[in-house]
Amino acid sequence: MNAGPWLPVPPRGYGGIENIVATLVPELRALGIEVVLATVGDSTLAADERVHTFPSGQFEMLQRPYNQACGVVPAHQAAVVRRVAVGDIDLVHDHVEAAGLTMLAAFGAGGPPGLQTLHWDLRKHPELYGSFDGGDRVRVNGVSADQLTHAPEALRRHAIGHVHLATPLAVDADRRESHEKHGYAVVLGRINAGKGQDLAAELAHRHGFDLVLAGPVGPYHTPEALAGADPQNPDVRFWREKVAPHVDGDRVRWVGTVAGDDRDALVAGARAALFPLRWNEPGGTAVVEALALGTPVVGIARGCLPELIEHGRTGLLTTDEDELGALMHGVDAISEAECRAEAARRFTPAVMAAGYAALYERMVASA
């Protein structure tokens, strides 16, 4: 299981892929699968064995020029290759963008089967994905069915299906007591144009509902840090030009990055989790977390949202940005208990692990 060199597993705060790996590995081990985890040295997740090159996560290197950062992934991947060369690995499950896929292909016909989970927008890396050929040994999976429809044909030929993301919050969510709801909607996630926080803020003022924005602006996690932000950072520019003019501290508030129990309490107390998407969200971790916390989803019906949300039962969806704000007036009719029950049925770590175990079996059998 290759989690990459960027953050520890589990991460301390932000880290979508690392959180998914941290959710998946214990359930795989509970099924009797032995897991060698390729990560960084300060990861704390239990595994049968750990492999690492770097003592700690290298996430800050992503802010440096390419000629300073370009050695990080190859150094990490080299450790994975050395471990696989021992010869006792039955399958490699990789989560490292782009370079993971080329590593799996480079093992050649004598290597173990390789599965890469695609966590990102598949319109990226057209030169790689548009010409990729991993033969019969390399496969990919999506985190939603919609995500795979946006892949180039060459990559789609290697697809073995999709497995929806999961959250530990979904475990026994149907048995959890109701949480007191307050009058606000919440948008959770990194603030950028694709997430649509500017649309959410404008709709809050126009339709008269309170809104809390929670998430970093680029690498800046607090208002104090943002005060000295690099104005050339595209997320900072988006914030200052499109979002900040609507943030008045009353109708619309920004609370910076919120994690752990504070994040859960913020989402559980919201009338709705708002997803004003302007891109095709591939996985939707925040969507399934909201359901597990008993908070209905109101969003644009694109990307993975129509696969995760049943309109009228666990949320309200529309294809019309202008209608999105009006849907907030009907969200109180959605049952909190129904949302939690759906999460407990579909989005637990055990359900996700069973999906991956089935893919592993298929790949090993065909190899």
Image: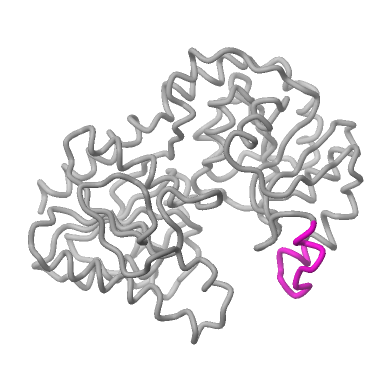
Query: Magenta stretch containing residue 233, yes or no?
Result: yes
Q: In the figure, is residue 93 to the left or right of 319? A: left
The residues colored magenta run: 224-238
Q: Is residue 261 above or below residue 99?
A: above
Residue 166 appears in the figure? yes
Task: Check the image and tell me how it is coloured.
Answer: one colour
x, y percent for residue 213: 75, 44
Task: Work out whether residue 179 or residue 91 is closer to the camera in this orientation and state it.
Answer: 179
Q: Quadrant of residue 302?
A: top right
Q: In the figure, is residue 80 to the left or right of 203? A: left
Give the quarter of the figure containing the C terminus.
Answer: bottom left
Q: Identify the residue at horizontal 53%, vertical 15% (top origin).
A: 176
x, y percent for residue 58: 47, 68
Residue 192 appears in the figure? no
x, y percent for residue 276: 70, 43
Q: Quadrant of residue 191?
A: bottom right
Q: Is residue 328 above or below residue 138?
A: above
Q: Identify the residue at horizontal 42%, vertical 26% (top origin).
A: 346
Q: Identify the residue at horizontal 30%, vertical 64% (top origin).
A: 52
Q: How many marks?
A: 0
Q: In the figure, is residue 53 to the left or right of 57? A: left
